[in-house]
Image (cartoon, rainbow, N blue to C red):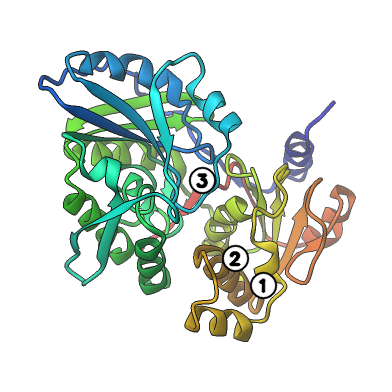
Amino acid sequence: MYSLYSLVEQYVTRKRFDIIEPVFPNVFVQKIQVSVSGSGSVVIVVPDHTRTLRVGDILGFVLDGFSGFDDVKVLFGTGTHNMSDNDVKRLLGDVDVDYSVHDAWSSEHVFVGKTSRDLDVYIDREYAEADVKIVVGVVVPHPWAGFSGGAKLVLPGVSSIYTINEHHTRWFLHKRSRAGVLNGNIFREEIENAAMLAGVDYSLNTVTFGDRIVYMRWSRGLDSFYDCVRITSRIYLRPVPRKKYDVVVADARPFDLNLYQATKAIDHAKLVLNKGGSLILVCECPGGYGGIRDYLDMSKYEIYEGLKMKRFRNLVPPLVALTLKDLQKRVKLYIVSSNISGDEMFEKIELDELESIVKGKRTLFIKQAGTTVPKLDF
């Protein structure tokens, strides 16, 4: 039985649309030697279930490097995501380790300082008070932070909801807050400042291709992140044959768990879409809307009022909804999905309806658009 994605790929191939997709890198995973001497407590922040990293595969050899320490613990950096016990078990696999799941609302947080732009940074107490602080990340393009991984394991990873909300509302609309961009990206710079205040001692960052780790680096501080950016850029920042298209078909993988995560693909696809064009999101979304549905049903005024009056417990989904509503003024949004119904934001279509939209139009297909970004001159 063919999957939704394979059926779309077959159609696109027949139509000979322009296509961009990740390119497997000519690099080899080198064995990493993790060895840290000392005593006391170690806290290792790792990604949650919304990322492509199989955490247990990494922890197997990372934990061996801290055999002399009294207390080694894993902390899942969830940001504002919810994470179940089943999610934890799936990520850890057979690894037996003490762990906890960060909660931006109910975990105990401590103040570690102000960033250069006056953002108050509160982080998980367990992490703040550890003798050795480590982050483990997966580095792929991110629509606001430039790239995931590195310092993002601190903010939003283990930060309080106050710090996350303040940071996102201030900087998510900045003109340089976009995928693949670090230079001049204030959204990212504030994340880096927060990690410096937290005092990250070591980092292990990885680059993945599908569910396979293709590159990793271990370093003091956050240097490993920048090395991984170099590799992941070669994989996921892809040149496009044209500057703009009338239609962009975006396959939301690997962030197709729910519509909230799948909006990353929309952020990447819109970079090369003409005003008045059509964006077709292809997304299985087994988790449904992922908490964004209520905000899509609100007007922009209602969202702005809610933000102003601080009525929302988590500001990130309404901010994402606002970006979609702004985009909807410029383009037509369609969705092909087994688990998402049509609504005021997206017109749901079936595969056999694609032809009527793309006929005679300059069309681009972005494979795995959750991480694949059209490479433009920024």
Q: Residues within 10 Å of mark 2 (few under 14, many from 20)?
A: many
> Residue 245: image x %, image y %?
62, 63
Calculate the distance from the C-alpha at mark 3 to the C-alpha at mark 1: 20 Å
- N-terminal label among 1 and 2: 2
Observer able to see residue 33:
no
Compared with 245, 355 (above or below) is above
Q: Residues within 10 Å of mark 3 (few under 14, many from 20)?
A: many
Quadrant (top left, top right, bottom left, bottom right) of the C terminus: bottom left
> Residue 189: image x %, image y %?
25, 60
Along the viewing direction, whichever of 176 and 97 lies nearer the viewer: 97
> Residue 202: image x %, image y %?
20, 33
Identify the residue at horizontal 55%, vertical 85% (top origin).
305
> Comparing marks 1 and 2, which lies closer to the viewer?
1
Calculate the distance from the C-alpha at mark 3 to the C-alpha at mark 2: 15 Å
Quadrant (top left, top right, bottom left, bottom right) of the N terminus: top right
Residue holding disc 2: 273
Secondary structure under tag 1 reads loop
Mark 1 touching mark 2, by CB under 8 A?
yes
Compared with 317, 28 (above or below) is above
Please, what is the three-letter code of the amino acid marked with disc 3?
Thr
Secondary structure under tag 2 reads strand
- N-terminal label among 3 and 1: 1
Residue holding disc 3: 372
Instruction: Classify residue 172 by image quadrant.
Output: bottom left
Calculate the distance from the C-alpha at mark 1 to the C-alpha at mark 2: 8 Å
- N-terminal label among 3 and 2: 2
Along the viewing direction, whichever of 183 and 324 lies nearer the viewer: 324
